[in-house]
Amino acid sequence: MSDETDLFGAARMGYVVVESDRLHDWRRFLKQGLGLHEVPADEDALAFRMDDHERRFMIRKGAAEDVVATGWHLRDQAALDIVLRRLAERGIAVEPGSTEEAAFRGVAGFVRLMGPKAMAIELFIEARTTATPLNMLTSGFVTGDSGMGHLAITSRRPEKMLRFWQEIFDARLSDRIHQPLSGAMLDIDFLRLNARHHTIAIAATRGLRLDPIRTRVQHVNMLVSTLDDLTDAFERLCDLGYEMAHEIGQHPNDREVSFYVVSPSGFELELGWNALTVDEAAWRPTSYNAISVWGHRPRRNSRLDRLAINAGNFRRGLRSLLHPEYSPL
């Protein structure tokens, strides 16, 4: 039995869990570079705050060097029940997380399912919060009802991934970007779950579907409160020696000013400022022919650099043809 309840606005991204053997480097990256607040964790893990939630960004020791789970905050038990019913109708299994796992994530409890690209999607309704003042190099992050940020994911099965987010969470299409990249055309769909312009971006090569990205996500995004927060973090990360995949620039669709830095695990983290929120009454999806209005130039931009990057992307893309991409639908 299907339901007619629209869940738009009832879900937001709550946390990210990364598995990495580079804990020391991740501490430098998140605390000294991006300016988050570190909270105590065990010797095989790191945990960080951005706001009043006890945990937002967690690193656990392991070999994956990848995002292994994302947490999705549902508005209430009724919204969670609708999601669970929709999953059951489609034969998608869920399992409860353990008490220890919930404590590590800073939530009262959660259930887990295997999402697109074999990323664990974890659903919860109660985040543990704290009034302890933040001790951050960054003055603040934009979170609240729109969540902690967004994910950008490359896919060889974008139609199925789009269907998952639309059928389970009632995601809405904000717009599309078509961007030539390394001799191929990249088509990107931007989906919103709430007033944030997008919480999920799905990128796919046109024609032959290749996936040049080793990790489950291409990037994780977070928004800072001020332009000074953005430029100060950019300078700190450069001084610490982290590679800028794309320097400061602006996107045409959400108008966000941002930069992309390569994380210790290899996927990128986009730090942004001043992204628009969607007015549902007036918004109409549109298409753009470039990912940036200005800037976002790679630091390594010589002809030799471009050839090396393109060759690496092409090799990884070809290798992706040897392995099926998991989809729950």
Image: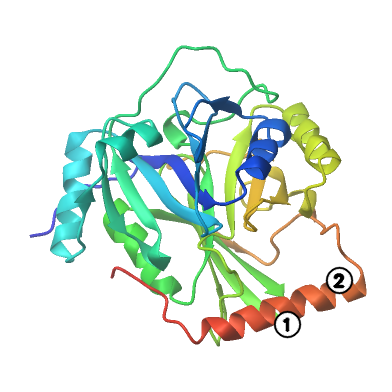
Quadrant showing the N terminus:
bottom left
Q: Is residue 45 above or below residue 175?
A: above
**Residue 271 appears in the figure:** no
Determine whether the residue tagged by mark 1 lies in a helix, strand or loop. loop
Q: Is residue 176 above or below residue 5?
A: below
Question: What is the crowding at mark 2: few (fewer than 14 residues within 10 Å), some, or many (at least 20)?
Answer: few
Judged from this view, the residue extending furthest toward the front is 43
Residue named by callout 2: 305
Q: Residue at x 21, y 63 (%)?
A: 92
Give the side of residue 144 with respect to residue 274, left or right.
Answer: left
**Residue 73 appears in the figure:** yes
Give the side of residue 214 with respect to residue 232, left or right.
Answer: left
Quadrant showing the C terminus:
bottom left
Q: Nearer the viewer, mark 1 or mark 2?
A: 2
Determine whether the residue tagged by mark 2 lies in a helix, strand or loop. helix
Question: Whole-percent x and y of residue 311?
Answer: 75, 81
Q: Residue at x 83, y 73 (%)?
A: 306
Q: Residue at x 22, y 40 (%)?
A: 79
Quarter of the image where one finds residue 32: top right
Q: Is residue 245 above or below residue 40?
A: below
Question: Whole-percent x and y of residue 273?
Answer: 67, 36
Judged from this view, the residue extending furthest toward the left is 1
Q: Nearer the viewer, residue 210 or 291?
A: 210
Give the side of residue 216 with respect to residue 167, left or right.
Answer: right
Whole-angstrom CA distance, mark 1 to mark 2, is 15 Å
Question: Whole-percent x and y of residue 16?
Answer: 47, 44
Q: Nearer the viewer, residue 117 or 256?
A: 117
Question: What is the crowding at mark 1: few (fewer than 14 residues within 10 Å), some, or many (at least 20)?
Answer: few
Q: Which amino acid type is shown beneath numbered disc 1?
A: Gly
Q: Residue at x 66, y 51 (%)?
A: 264
Q: Earlier in the sequence, mark 1 or mark 2?
A: 1
Residue named by callout 1: 183
